[in-house]
Image (cartoon, helix red, strand yellow):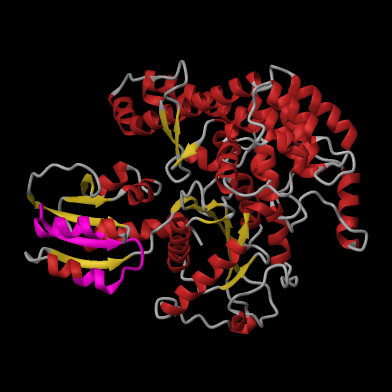
């Protein structure tokens, strides 16, 4: 279950089926991102793809009949029409057309009618309709999936298509479970199930569940069950880069950062193309520092060796090793740029102090002590207003129903500092206690003896690292799944005829409506290392900024029923 491998196999298939010779590839906006996250431009050049063009943007009218054209696009109405126009007046000698998802027969018939010159050699579906971020993590790049706490229609249809593509590319016909009580989860589960039934021939992978082995599981979750994870500052490399610098389609934009060399203003962070990043994306901030130091020392040793060119043999060796040396030089400089920026931001924003307090609020119930500390920290002008708002958000979520909850006084401090106070009531409406059903704050009932004992033992042991005390709700949910615990009624199955297996599933695809996070990807990575098979996906991959933006969009226009005490902090100016 490797998503990057799945996408690569599809692209290899396209390049091989079009045969030898120079090729161009015709893409749309989304398939450009899909390919670029799995292949570098040099990888594509090795496959004789020399020209990249966009179907949906300005192109030259120059005819190049000597070139073969691979078309890789999403089967949208707009793309079908643009491709029909292309085929009526073909620029290239032959066309090999690949759609990234299921295409209606009526559209195929329409395209065939437009291909009067009979230049189309191949029309196929390849199910590469998602962005593979890591081997076990995918995104659909839907930044806002809800409005008025319900699906945006375009976001829903794109999510259905993306999830079907993931299941088809991994050859899974799963039991579908969704979070009970979540209308968005239930709606998505129903539509996925309807599509699988409609396209039953595609999903006939004729897997016999030998020895009573359970079928795979698609688990559809709602971000609102765990609003804490996206708000916390992260300390592992990939997650920290996304939180502080923002990763978009495996790229980090440093063009607005002072002192960055021209060649390093846009950096590619892909575990598939960068061995150092692949080995260290889950390492914590402290470990990365010492690892980069070791890489730097190794680079300096090789640089010295390169200076000793005294004989013909030395020259030959130099020529052979120079490409690796040049690549290593780029890797060192790239990660030094990133680490330098992360370090500067950590110091500038006092993130050690802020993060420690965030973790305390997320993991421990000490109301009066935490309230005093939060008051002091958020009033400090050296703490950025965004970090201050996140601290108040965590406090409001944890102590929403505490007898002495004093969110209003904290919001008054935020208002004095000119912060967007409406974020907090919007967050409570979006994911307050009335919405959540997961146990994110360990508010354990005495009757639940197992959990109570586990929490006591955890408390006695203490924590290895105050900055990484928090574990996402997803980790606990997946542990329950793999232990074979009863998932009903919390996660009912929509295709219950597949359910009567006593054993836990061997393969699980988890999808979070409202976005996944890199902290959850880390939990999935640890489970996969322990021998399980889990894929995580989300409508997007959130950092705290994008999560808050989604919360504001999702709650826009709704009546605020659960935040009456915060009414004076809700105004149209805050949106």
- The x, y position of residue 335, in whole percent, is 50, 29
* Residue 228 shows up from this direction: no
Left or right, 362 with respect to 179, comes to right
Query: Relative to 111, is 408 above or below?
Result: above
Identify the residue at image location x=77%, y=29%: 410
Identify the residue at image location x=30%, y=30%: 319
Locate residue 465: give its quadrant: top right
Residue placed most toward the observer, 511 or 461: 511
Identify the residue at image location x=60%, y=49%: 521
Query: Relative to 176, is 135 above or below?
Result: above
* Residue 509 shows up from this direction: yes
Query: Relative to 170, is 227 above or below?
Result: above
Query: Relative to 192, is 78 above or below?
Result: above
Residue placed most toward the observer, 450 or 54: 54
- The x, y position of residue 220, in whole percent, is 59, 63
Left or right, 200 with respect to 342, comes to left
Locate residue 499: give its quadrant: bottom right
Q: Quarter holding the C terminus? A: top right
The verdict on residue 106 being magenta is: yes
Report the span colored magenta.
80-109
Identify the residue at image location x=61%, y=27%: 289
- The x, y position of residue 14, in whole percent, is 27, 60
Residue placed most toward the observer, 318 or 502: 502
- The x, y position of residue 493, in whole percent, is 63, 74
The verdict on residue 278 being magenta is: no
């Amino acid at each position: 279950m490797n998503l990057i491998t799945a996408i690569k196999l599809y692209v290899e298939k396209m390049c091989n089926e079009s045969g030898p010779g120079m090729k161009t590839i015709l893409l749309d906006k989304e398939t450009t991102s899909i390919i670029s996250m799995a292949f570098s431009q040099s990888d594509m050049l090795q496959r004789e793809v020399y020209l990249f063009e966009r179907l949906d943007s300005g192109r030259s009218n120059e005819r190049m009949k000597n070139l073969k054209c691979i078309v890789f696009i999403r089967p949208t109405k707009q793309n079908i029409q643009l491709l029909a126009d292309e085929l009526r007046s073909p620029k290239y000698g032959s066309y090999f057309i690949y759609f990234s998802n299921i295409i209606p027969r009526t559209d195929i018939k329409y395209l065939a009618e437009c291909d009067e010159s009979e230049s189309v050699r191949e029309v196929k579906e390849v199910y590469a309709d998602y962005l593979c971020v890591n081997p076990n993590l995918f995104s659909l790049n839907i930044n806002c999936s809800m409005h008025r706490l319900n699906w945006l229609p375009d976001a829903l249809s794109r999510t259905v298509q993306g999830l079907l593509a993931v299941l088809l590319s991994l050859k899974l016909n799963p039991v579908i479970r969704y979070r009970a009580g979540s209308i968005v989860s239930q709606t998505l589960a129903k539509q996925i199930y309807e599509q699988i039934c409609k396209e039953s021939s595609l999903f006939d992978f004729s897997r016999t569940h030998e020895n009573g082995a359970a079928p795979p599981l698609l688990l559809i979750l709602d971000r609102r069950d765990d609003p804490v994870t996206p708000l916390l500052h992260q300390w592992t490399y990939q997650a920290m880069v996304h939180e502080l610098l923002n990763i978009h389609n495996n790229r980090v934009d440093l063009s607005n950062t002072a002192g960055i060399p021209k060649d390093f203003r846009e950096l590619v962070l892909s575990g598939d193309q960068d061995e150092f990043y692949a080995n260290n994306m889950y390492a914590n901030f402290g470990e990365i520092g010492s690892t980069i130091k070791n890489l730097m020392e190794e680079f300096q040793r090789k640089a010295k060796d390169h200076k000793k060119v005294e004989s013909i043999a030395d020259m030959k060796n130099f020529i052979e090793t120079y490409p690796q040396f040049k690549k290593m030089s780029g890797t060192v400089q790239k990660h030094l740029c990133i680490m330098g920026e992360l370090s500067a931001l950590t110091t500038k924003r006092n993130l050690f102090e802020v993060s420690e307090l965030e973790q305390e609020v997320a993991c421990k119930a000490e109301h009066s002590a935490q309230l005093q500390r939060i008051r002091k920290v958020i009033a400090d002008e050296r703490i950025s207003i965004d970090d201050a708002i996140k601290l108040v958000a965590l406090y409001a979520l944890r102590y929403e129903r505490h007898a002495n909850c004093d969110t209003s006084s904290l919001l008054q401090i935020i208002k004095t500092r000119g912060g967007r106070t409406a974020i907090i009531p919007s967050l409570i409406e979006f994911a307050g206690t009335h919405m959540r059903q997961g146990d994110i704050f360990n508010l354990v009932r005495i009757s639940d003896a197992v959990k109570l004992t586990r929490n006591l033992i955890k408390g006695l042991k203490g924590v290895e690292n105050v900055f990484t005390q928090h574990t996402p709700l997803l980790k606990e949910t997946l542990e329950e799944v793999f232990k074979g615990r009863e998932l009903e009624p919390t996660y009912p199955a929509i295709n219950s005829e597949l359910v009567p297996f006593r054993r836990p599933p061997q393969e699980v695809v988890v999808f979070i409506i409202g976005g996944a996070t890199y902290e959850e990807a880390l939990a999935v990575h640890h489970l996969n290392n322990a021998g399980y098979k889990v894929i995580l996906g989300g409508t997007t991959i959130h950092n705290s900024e994008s999560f808050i933006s989604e919360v504001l969009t999702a709650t826009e226009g709704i009546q605020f029923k659960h935040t009456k005490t915060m009414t004076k902090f809700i105004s149209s100016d805050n949106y």
